[in-house]
Image: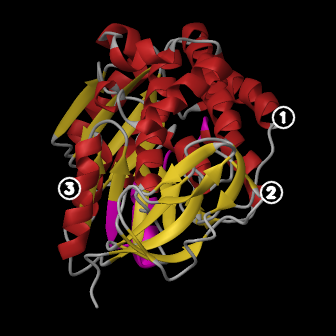
Amino acid sequence: MIIFTYPGQGSQIPGMGASWQDHPSWELVTEASEITGRDLAHLLVSADADVLRQTRNSQLATFLTSLIALDALAIVGISPSAHAGHSLGEYSALAASGALSFADAISLVAERGEAMQTASEEHEGTMAAVLGLVDEEVEAACKETGGEVWVANYNAVGQVVIAGAPDSVSTAGARAKDRGAKRVMPLPVGGAFHTPFMNSASDRLAKAIDKVEFHQPDFPVYANVDAVAHTDITEWPDLLRRQLCSPVRWCQQIKQTIADGGDTFVEIGPGKALTAMIKRIDKSKETYQVNTPDDIDTLLKSLGTSTTAPALGEHLYVYERIIVSPAAGIFTSNEDLPEGDGIGVGSVIGKVGDQEVYSPFAGQIMGYLAHDTERVFANQPLAWLRTEESPK
């Protein structure tokens, strides 16, 4: 079972969107810029590390890069059986599953970044990673301080992040070392995220959450707050409200996905932080990253030879492909190409409005996924192919 994972704040790097500029999925940047009223192309290509480190920038940039990569995966027909995102990545997971529209998700991420930035400026806080100590010992070290410090992230076995007031975090780190921690690493962040210091941000974000519509997800999404999969859309508004002030139970999430059958994890977006955490949790699992367009070809080849992950999602295999719409409009199929017919690269399978839809693949049409006269959107799947290289 393939799980798509999505990184959170801290994974951003300068130029992380540069490799996608000539890819069809880059059109999401234009759409997102119009929705937010910001030049997000500049943020993904030209912004330096200091600019990207600002919460209001890092969250938008990371979310958008993940969604560009996800869209590119959808174009070649790769889909998962479930989604899981770390902190901010939970919004990427919800958008990927269809629980949130792209427009609503990017609007919420923009509001979340602004709310957290403001809360951090109002209430000084910091974070530190505690390595080589079990969860219970880290929790005890925080309680011993008697100050404002809490566990913020359960990232992996022996890797826990604490957060709170700077003095309290420093004291808790020293107590953790006394209890046997191998290392305590201060993190270069601008606030104490996933602690009560984010209460004002949570209240502000709740108002934005109440304005968006949640939809039935295509696949389950695992939540940070309770580490279990959710498909009931009525549960997500409260889960997102609680997320900002609750610890991210990433280690518990990954263990639950494995218990549910997850054996292959694809990290979608900048960096490799989640992949490293998953390997620390269970070294036996297959892990991949999609940071650039070239990574998609690598993923296809790897999955095609993998003994543990032959299938992509529930239905598509590595020798199957999806043709997607190049634009929004009314779809009309090519009546000269019925299901079962073979086609070559460049064959016209139909039209969207007046624009012809060309197949980038050669193979056999297994089925149309849109009906004649149906209004479709850009990148919506239109037809399903079995490629010429498929097993007979």
Look at discs 1 and 3 and give the one toward the viewer. Answer: 3
Q: Which residue is mark 1?
A: 211
Look at discs 2 and 1 and give the one toward the viewer. Answer: 1
* Rendered position, 237 above or below 183: below
Q: Report the span colored magenta.
A: 244-265
Give the amino acid at mark 1. Lys
Q: Is residue 385 magenta?
A: no
Q: In x, y percent, where is residue 276?
A: 23, 50
Q: Which residue is mark 3?
A: 298
| CA separation in Å, label 3 and label 2 | 38 Å
Q: Is residue 259 magenta?
A: yes
Is the residue marked by circle 1 packed among few (<14), some (14-19), or many (20+) residues within 10 Å? few
* Rendered position, 124 above or below 335: above
Q: Tell me, yes or no, whether the two marked residues, 3 and 2, touch with CB atoms within 8 Å.
A: no
Q: Which residue is mark 2?
A: 234
Quadrant including the N terminus: bottom left
> What residue is drawn where x is 55% and y is 72%?
337
Q: Secondary structure at mark 3?
A: helix
Look at discs 3 and 2 and give the one toward the viewer. Answer: 3
Mark 3 or mark 2, earlier in chain: 2
Q: Is residue 18 left or right of residue 222?
A: left
Q: Nearer the viewer, residue 331 or 268?
A: 331
Q: In x, y percent, where is residue 334?
A: 60, 64
Q: Tell me, yes or no, whether the two marked residues, 1 and 3, touch with CB atoms within 8 Å.
A: no
Q: Secondary structure at mark 1?
A: loop
